[in-house]
Image: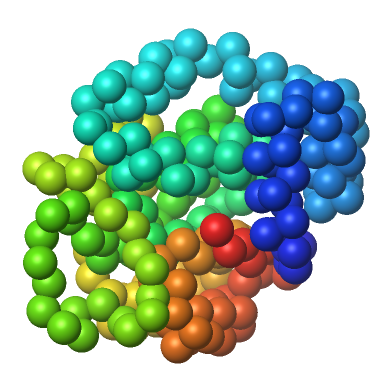
Amino acid sequence: MIIKNYSKFVKLARNMLLHPRRYFEIVHVIQKLTNATIFQIGIIGKDLYSNMNLHEHIKKSHVQCEDQNLIFAGMPESPLLYLLVRILKPDIIVETGVASGLTSTFILQALHDNKKGRLYSIDLSKIDGVAYPKGYFLEGGETGVIPRGGESGWMIPLELRYRWTLISGRTSEKLLPLLEELEHIDIFLHDSEHSYKNMLFEYQSVLPYIRRGGGNVES
């Protein structure tokens, strides 16, 4: 499965949060992407929204961080990624870009609930308020920002980290060795530097390794 219009998917997610009546439109999109039934989506959605431990953890992270934008940039699409991972039941997910780890948290929660799978994350995030030398990040490439005193994935619950491998560094140096080690992957999530050069490199590197029926997602 290749998600060709993920931006539309995220737009629908934001609309769902603002207009709950559009929930069934979201369900329809998930059905088209996964062939899941409305009943299956409903059961999995109930698992997520009844997970009070996860909700409380996110709320506490919200309180701890002075600038909530450093946490919740991925909030609209994160629950949808949870649904996709639960339905597709992947064995291996590779993610580039972690920042505070909100999206990673929802993916890891889905893997935990599936009782299978592992998330490999590559990250080189900016720390809020730190000055970096020119050229440290690719020109024109947006990347995640971490609150002062934090580290990549700081908000990911400890109890979910047993299915997580974090690799610190640039994707230009770390991605290909990881793919060669894994040999194949099921889902790839690009959310690192959004420059043309970096995105082209990541997609060209990953496509040969995506297992038939797997997916390529841009956040």
Q: Is residue 197 left or right of residue 162?
A: right
Please state which of residues 212 and 22 is positioned toward the viewer in this rendering: 22
Q: Is residue 36 left or right of residue 59?
A: right
Residue at x 43%, y 39% (from the top left corner): 72
* Rendered image quadrant of residue 113: top right
Question: Quick one: quadrant of the C terminus?
Answer: bottom right
Q: Position of residue 124 (x, y in %)?
A: 26, 65
* Rendered image quadrant of residue 162: top left
Q: Position of residue 218 (x, y in %)?
A: 58, 64
Q: Is residue 54 left or right of residue 122?
A: right
Residue at x 19%, y 79% (from the top left corner): 136
Total numbered labels placed on residues in the image: 0
Please state which of residues 213 and 22 is positioned toward the viewer in this rendering: 22
**Is any atom of residue 175 visible in this view?**
no
**Is any atom of residue 18 visible in this view?**
yes
Q: Position of residue 68 (x, y in %)?
A: 34, 35
Q: Position of residue 94 (x, y in %)?
A: 47, 61
According to the image, what is the colour scheme of the structure?
Answer: rainbow
Question: Quick one: quadrant of the N terminus?
Answer: bottom right
Residue at x 70%, y 49% (from the top left corner): 11
Please state which of residues 14 and 216 is positioned toward the viewer in this rendering: 14
Residue at x 74%, y 56% (from the top left corner): 8
* Rendered image quadrant of residue 212: bottom right
Q: Is residue 49 above or below residue 205?
A: above
Q: Is residue 138 left or right of residue 39?
A: left
Please state which of residues 185 and 29 is positioned toward the viewer in this rendering: 29
